[in-house]
Image (spheres, helix red, strand yellow):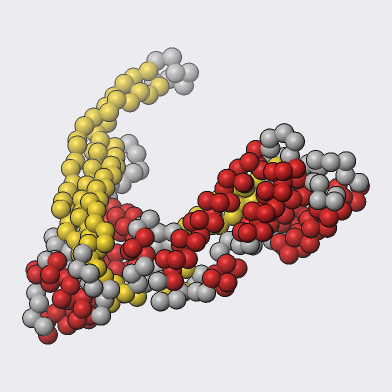
């Protein structure tokens, strides 16, 4: 399955924004990362069965999240509605109690046209209230020369959720991914504050959302944001015109005009006979932001050759660009399956 051609994807793979921090400029670059579960990311047609003991609606939350996963405006997974699953299972006289069995999962998946089946079980969903008193102090007079102590009644509510989830390959009849998830959260309310305690269903719903997000996140290629510093001080004896070119190029980056910044930094690099590591490095950042990673690497290596003493930004870029390229290549491979 081809999600996007590599050429089109490259132009969309990295976006840019600029923020000033002190005297330096930091560029925020969005970089494509592969899914953590490589095989799962290559499985696009998915069915989600009802989970055992699912009083928190976890299977529905996972199904909804999978259906919402998009990359560059295109839906990533195709999910088979659970109404359709129920209809077909009823027709084939396969009961949900049997669907969690690996053999039945494969059989049901083949009937549904799914590449993978997600099943699971909510192991525990509990609430515990701890009632206690807490000490408070209060001034008796305006000048607080005398202080009185008193106690207030409090409740600390702890809600726990544990679930086992697995993803089974329909064609190979083996498990792609399986894991146990445990979430716990605590809330406190005392009689002298305005905090409110969530109900059991509300608290468990929040934890179920956390589990669903964590599970689906591992299956999907996604963008992460890197903060990359620009170099805004000339490294050579720039002419007044060259200094202005550097200044304006950075302003264009700030305005999101990478095309203009690219031309200006290219002119600056040429005007210094390719001897300015500041120009080479900043142009490399622009190229990286545009998704032109091979050009970015070439410029970072040029800047590395030109630096006489270590420059942190350049050293970080030389290491980073190889990692970014490897991650994007793996993500593209996952997407193209």
Q: Position of residue 156 (x, y in %)?
A: 25, 38
Q: Residue drawn 34% across and 44% down?
A: 195
In the current view of this chain or complex, which residue is farthest to the right?
240
Q: Position of residue 9 (x, y in %)?
A: 54, 69
Residue 260 seen in this snapshot: yes
Q: Position of residue 190 (x, y in %)?
A: 29, 37
**Residue 241 located left or right of residue 118:** right
**Residue 252 located left or right of residue 132:** right
- Looking at the figure, which quarter contains the C terminus? bottom left
In the current view of this chain or complex, which residue is farthest to the bottom?
91
Viewer-proximal residue among 314 and 308:
308
Q: Residue drawn 25% across and 80% down?
A: 113
Q: Residue drawn 19% across and 35% down?
A: 131
Q: Residue drawn 22% across and 51% down?
A: 180
- Looking at the figure, which quarter contains the N terminus? bottom left
Q: Position of residue 45 (x, y in %)?
A: 31, 74
In the current view of this chain or complex, which residue is farthest to the front?
305
Q: Is residue 118 above or below residue 143?
A: below
Viewer-proximal residue among 104 and 182:
104
- The picture quadrant where one finds residue 82 is bottom left
**Residue 149 located left or right of residue 317:** left
**Residue 95 located left or right of residue 263:** left
Viewer-proximal residue among 225 and 35:
35
Q: Is residue 109 above or below residue 182?
A: below
Total marks placed? 0
- The picture quadrant where one finds residue 283 is bottom right
Residue 117 seen in this snapshot: no
């Amino acid at each position: 399955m081809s999600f996007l051609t590599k050429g089109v994807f490259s132009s969309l793979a990295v976006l840019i924004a600029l923020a000033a921090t002190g005297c330096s400029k930091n560029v925020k670059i969005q970089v494509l990362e592969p899914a953590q579960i490589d095989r799962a990311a290559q499985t696009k047609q998915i069915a989600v069965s009802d989970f055992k003991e699912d009083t928190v609606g976890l299977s529905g939350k996972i199904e909804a999240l999978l259906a919402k996963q998009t990359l560059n405006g295109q839906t990533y997974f195709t999910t088979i509605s659970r109404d359709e699953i129920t209809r077909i299972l009823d027709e084939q006289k396969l009961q949900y109690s049997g669907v969690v069995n690996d053999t039945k999962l494969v059989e049901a998946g083949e009937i549904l046209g799914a590449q993978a089946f997600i099943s699971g079980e909510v192991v525990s969903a509990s609430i515990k209230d701890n009632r206690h008193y807490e000490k408070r102090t209060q001034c008796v007079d305006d000048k607080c020369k005398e202080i009185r102590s008193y106690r207030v009644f409090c409740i600390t509510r702890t809600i726990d959720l544990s679930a086992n989830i697995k993803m089974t390959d329909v064609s190979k009849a083996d498990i792609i991914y399986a894991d146990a998830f445990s979430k716990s959260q605590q809330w406190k309310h005392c009689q002298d504050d305005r905090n409110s305690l969530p109900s059991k269903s509300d608290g468990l719903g929040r934890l179920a959302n956390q589990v669903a997000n964590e599970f689906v996140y591992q299956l999907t290629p996604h963008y992460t944001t890197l903060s990359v510093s620009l170099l805004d001080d000339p490294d050579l004896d720039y002419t007044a015109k060259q200094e202005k070119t550097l200044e304006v190029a950075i302003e264009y980056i700030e305005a999101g005009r990478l095309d203009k910044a690219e031309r200006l930094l290219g002119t600056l690099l040429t005007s210094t006979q390719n001897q300015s590591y500041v120009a080479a490095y900043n142009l490399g950042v622009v190229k990286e932001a545009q998704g032109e990673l091979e050009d970015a690497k070439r410029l970072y290596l040029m800047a590395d050759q030109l630096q006489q003493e270590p420059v942190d930004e350049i050293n970080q870029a030389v290491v980073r660009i190889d990692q970014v390229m490897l991650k994007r290549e793996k993500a593209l491979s996952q997407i193209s399956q």
